[in-house]
Image (cartoon, grey):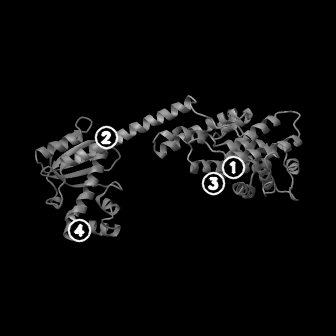
Amino acid sequence: MAVLLQANLSFMPLHDILQWIDMNRISCVVVVSQDNEDDISFYMESGKIIFAACQKPGKRLGEFLVKAGAMNGPQAYMALRESRNGNVSFTRYLIDNNLITVRELSECFAKLVETLLIDVISCGNASVSVTTPLPEAVINGPIQLETGRAIFDAVRVIDEMNRDLRKRDEAFEVINKKLYDEDFELPVLPGVVMQLTSLMQSEKAAFQDMARLVMTDQVLTSNILKIANSAFYGGTGQVDSLQFAIVKLGMREIMNVVTAVQIRSMRFKDVPQEQLQEILDNSLKTAFMASGLASLCRLDSEEAFMVGLLLDLGKTVILSVARDFKIEQEILDELLTNRHAEIGAMIARKWNYPESIQHLIRYHHNRNLGGVANSMIDLIQIADQVIKTDLEGELDAGQMKSLNLSYESVLDVYSKSIDTYQRIREL
């Protein structure tokens, strides 16, 4: 074996090397080696690419043929094994045994070479060696790919990828800046909820005042009665009047129910309905789940309810801000994950909820609040996990123990929470 050239791609790009081989009509093997990666080999006859090999899964010719539907997996495996046993090139075996047409093989081979060239050209840091002679098994193969065309196609795809990446990064930065500068509209609290909030802040507020306010909306009154009779609130006897519901549940709990019903019917500007509905539905479930767990743990159930309800509401703002930008779902998911808590806290502040609720929403993904273990944070995280996984995910043993919760008790609260959610959904 003779070595014609050895170089590092940071000093001599691969496309320059391939063009030199093409121009001089050299028959050789070009092997590209990257750290901790499988080698990529290009077999060139008289300057043209006649075969390419890489052992990395997903980047082998047989896999490209199967993916394109040119042949099935067992056929590709048997052809590869038989070609090796007969010391015949894989491509020659396929054509000689009429397993594929020359056109199909050429199209799949060109796609493989393009993929491998993109990998090598994009990495920029690898070593390359050019050796002769060619192995006999690959000489006089049935396909010959024009090297210049293959390079052109690969570079074109790289340019398109870089352009898309720049656009994505620019969109990401614009959205992030809008969020950082608070250049967006926060949702407005429904009118009846604003009135009830004002009422609850009055020291002289009585349940009769709440009843008079709510009874102006007969649909809302009917909905409250349906929820008051759900399994979540338990008890014996039918709740058949708003006054009885307020006495039984308490004014703060009625306030939570009204807020839940009203928020679920809200329409957030420029947020796709399907995504909005998923957020609102999960918010309702989480609110009832958190409230039920709080009652078991002797924590503030009304506070837990409101935190659970507003937990992911910040996502609606992000979706609204991102509406004019075409970005990959992965990037949008990153924004939703990283920024929704702080925006949710802004919503809670705008809606005049106490600082304790604002802080719990802002830090609901932290294991503690201000460096101190926080039972409400633990409870909210369990409620959130239960709803997002439909109780199929593993619950944190440490949090369960600190709250003195059993799996059976969580299951019971989950069942009642879903029942109440279904009642609201049917309203």
Query: What is the total number of numbered labels drawn onto the structure image?
Result: 4
**Dot 3 surroundings within 10 Å: few (below 14), some, or many (20 or more)?**
few
Q: Does the rendering let one see residue 184? A: yes
Q: Which one is nearer the viewer's eye here, 270 or 91?
A: 270
**Please, is residue 303 above or below residue 394 in the view?**
above
Q: Which one is nearer the viewer's eye here, 344 or 19?
A: 344
In this rendering, which labeled residue sits more in front, label 4 or label 2? Answer: 2
In this rendering, which labeled residue sits more in front, label 1 or label 3? Answer: 1
Q: Amino acid at mark 4?
A: Asn
Q: Which residue is mark 4?
A: 85
| Residue 8 placement (x, y as % from top left) | 25, 38
Q: Which mark is residue 394?
A: 3
Q: Which residue is mark 1?
A: 284
In this rendering, which labeled residue sits more in front, label 3 or label 4? Answer: 3
Tag 1 and tag 3, C-beta contact below 8 Å: no
**Dot 1 surroundings within 10 Å: few (below 14), some, or many (20 or more)?**
many
Q: Which mark is residue 159?
A: 2
Q: Does the rendering let one see residue 393? A: no
| Residue 321 placement (x, y as % from top left) | 54, 37
Task: Using the numbered discs, state the Cα–Cα distance from disc 1 to disc 3 in whole angstroms.
Answer: 22 Å
**N-term mark: 1 or 2:** 2
Q: Is 425 positioned to the left or the right of 318 in the image?
A: right
**N-term mark: 3 or 4:** 4
Task: Using the numbered discs, state the Cα–Cα distance from disc 3 to disc 4 in whole angstroms.
Answer: 50 Å
| Residue 324 placement (x, y as % from top left) | 49, 39
The residue that appears at 23% across and 59% down in the rendered structure is 106
Tag 3 and tag 2, C-beta contact below 8 Å: no
**N-term mark: 1 or 4:** 4
**Dot 2 surroundings within 10 Å: few (below 14), some, or many (20 or more)?**
few
